[in-house]
Image: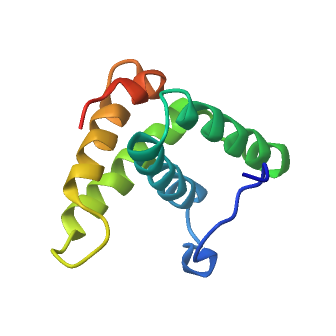
């Protein structure tokens, strides 16, 4: 709402490959926007997030390089879903389908849940 990104639980980030953390944040963003916003929301937010990250990163990451990390994060979350968690398979499956689509993220809003 204020034009900024806030990273929740940033302290749980891994100190390994930035793609794992970026993929996790992008996966959460994809689930959220598919559930609560229009088709362009994910693309707009993701572009802004990645542009800001790349402006300061030693090793910038493209959309195509990020996509496998998004798929990995979604698959891990789907495997870990328990009945009492807030994340439901119904949120993860459309996001995983969008991330795996041949067009990539450009059609994320077109996936039905």
Q: Residue at x 20, y 56 (%)?
A: 89
Q: Residue at x 35, y 45 (%)?
A: 71
Q: Residue at x 56, y 35 (%)?
A: 41
Q: Quadrant of residue 44?
A: top right
Name the image quarter holding the C terminus: top left
The correct choice, above or below, for 75 with respect to 61 in the image is below
Viewer-side residue, 40 vs 70: 40
Q: Quadrant of residue 102?
A: top left
The correct choice, above or below, for 65 with respect to 58 in the image is above
Q: Residue at x 53, y 57 (%)?
A: 25
The x, y position of residue 55, in whole percent, is 84, 44
* Left or right of residue 57: residue 108: left
Q: Quadrant of residue 42?
A: top right
- Residue at the extreme top of the image, as rendered: 103
Colour scheme employed for the rendering of this structure: rainbow
Viewer-side residue, 89 vs 38: 38
- Residue at the extreme left of the image, as rendered: 83
The correct choice, above or below, for 85 with respect to 57 in the image is below
The correct choice, above or below, for 87 with respect to 66 in the image is below
The x, y position of residue 80, in whole percent, is 23, 70
- Number of marks in the rendered image: 0
* Left or right of residue 84: residue 49: right
* Left or right of residue 25: residue 99: left
- Residue at the extreme right of the image, as rendered: 56
């Amino acid at each position: 709402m204020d034009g900024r990104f806030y990273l929740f639980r940033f302290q749980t980030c891994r100190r390994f490959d930035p793609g794992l953390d970026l993929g996790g944040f992008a996966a959460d963003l994809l689930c959220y926007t598919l559930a609560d916003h229009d088709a362009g929301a994910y693309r707009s937010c993701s572009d802004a997030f990645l542009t800001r990250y790349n402006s300061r990163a030693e090793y910038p990451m493209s959309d195509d390089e990020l996509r496998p990390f998004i798929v990995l994060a979604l698959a891990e979350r789907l495997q870990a879903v328990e009945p009492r968690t807030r994340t439901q398979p119904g949120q993860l499956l459309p996001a995983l389908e969008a991330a795996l689509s041949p067009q990539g993220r450009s059609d994320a809003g077109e996936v039905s849940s």
